[in-house]
Image (cartoon, helix red, strand yellow):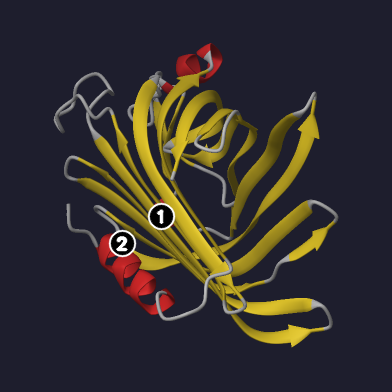
Amino acid sequence: MKTRTTLIALALASCAGFAHADYTFSNVSANWLDWSSNTQDRTNKGPFGGKADFAYLEAEGGMGGNWGDLYGFADVENADQNTRENGGQNRRYATKVVARVNVAQIGNLPVQAYAHVYDFREGKFYDQNRVLGLGTSFSAGSLWVKPFLGAHQEFKQGVGAHRNGMMAGWVLGFPFKAAGQDLMVTQWHEIEFDRENRYLAMGKDGKVVNGRKLANNGAVSLWWNATKSVTGGLTYRYADQKLGSATYQRALITTIKYNF
C-alpha cells in the first residue's frame, strides 16, 4: 500500500543510510490488544469509535548516532480480514516514522529538529498526523528520556489538511535486571492541545459530540528479553479524547517479538 508515510520513511531511511549509526535495531511481532469491558461498553454506544479486541502484526526498527535518531513501525491489524466493515473487525493499517536530528548543543543537552508522521488507514477512511518541532534527549543512570514539542497538522478524510493545534510528548526507557532476567520499562505519551473544532467530532453516549481541545494518548510497557532473539511484553494502552471517542479508553496488549 503506497502512502505518503511510506514515501517519507523511504526518504528518511535513505538519508540516514549515509550517516554513521552507533546502534540499530529491528524486530517483527505478533500482538493481541484486549480493550477493557467498560471501554467497550462506553465506546460501542456511539455512532463511531466503538472498540473491539483485535490482533495485529508489526515490523519495527530504528537507528541512532551522533547525528540523531530515526524510528519507525508498520502495523497490519486484523490481517485475516478484508477491508469491508465487519463488526469493527475489518483490516486496518497504521504506520509511524519519527526523526530527530541534532542541530545544536546547550550544555549537555542536544537541541534536535523533530518530525513525525503517523498514518492510519481503514478501507476508504484515512487520518494522518504530522508534527514538526524541537526535541531533546537526556539520561540519568539507566533511564533515558526523549521529549518533544511541535506544531500539529492533521490530514483527515472529509476534513482535509489543516493546522490542529500543538503536540508535546516523550518516549522513555529504563532497562534493569530482576531475578537474573533482562527487563525494561518503556513509555510513549502524546498530549494534543488547542485542537481545532473541525477535528473534534467524536462518539459519546450514542451521540456525536465535540471532544475537548486537550487529548492524551500513550502506553506503558514491561518487556522481558527472554533470549537475544525473543522478547515478550505486556502493555497498558490508554487514550482520552482520542481514537474517535470523547471518553477515556484503556486496554492491555500482549506481545511476542522476534529480534533480528
Q: Is residue 171 above or below residue 176?
A: below
Classed neighbour count for the residue bearing mark 2: other residues with Cα under 10 Å, few (<14), some (14–19), many (≥20): many
Kindly indicate the quadrant of the structure image that contains residue 50: top left
- Distance (Cα) linking label 1 and label 2: 7 Å
Quadrant into which the C terminus falls: top left
Label ID, residue 136: none
Q: Position of residue 4 (x, y in %)?
A: 26, 64
Q: Residue at x 36, y 22 (%)?
A: 54
Q: Residue at x 69, y 51 (%)?
A: 172
Which residue corresponds to mark 2?
5
Which residue corresponds to mark 1?
96
Q: Secondary structure at mark 1?
A: strand
Q: Position of residue 81 (x, y in %)?
A: 18, 25
Classed neighbour count for the residue bearing mark 1: other residues with Cα under 10 Å, few (<14), some (14–19), many (≥20): many
Q: Is residue 36 above or below residue 111?
A: above
Q: Answer yes or no: do the residues labelled 1 and 2 have beta carbons within 8 Å?
A: yes
- Of the residues shown, which amino acid type is indicated by label 1? Lys
Q: Residue at x 56, y 46 (%)?
A: 212
Closer to the camera in the image, 189 or 227: 227
Q: Position of residue 219 (x, y in %)?
A: 60, 38
Closer to the camera in the image, 173 or 24: 24
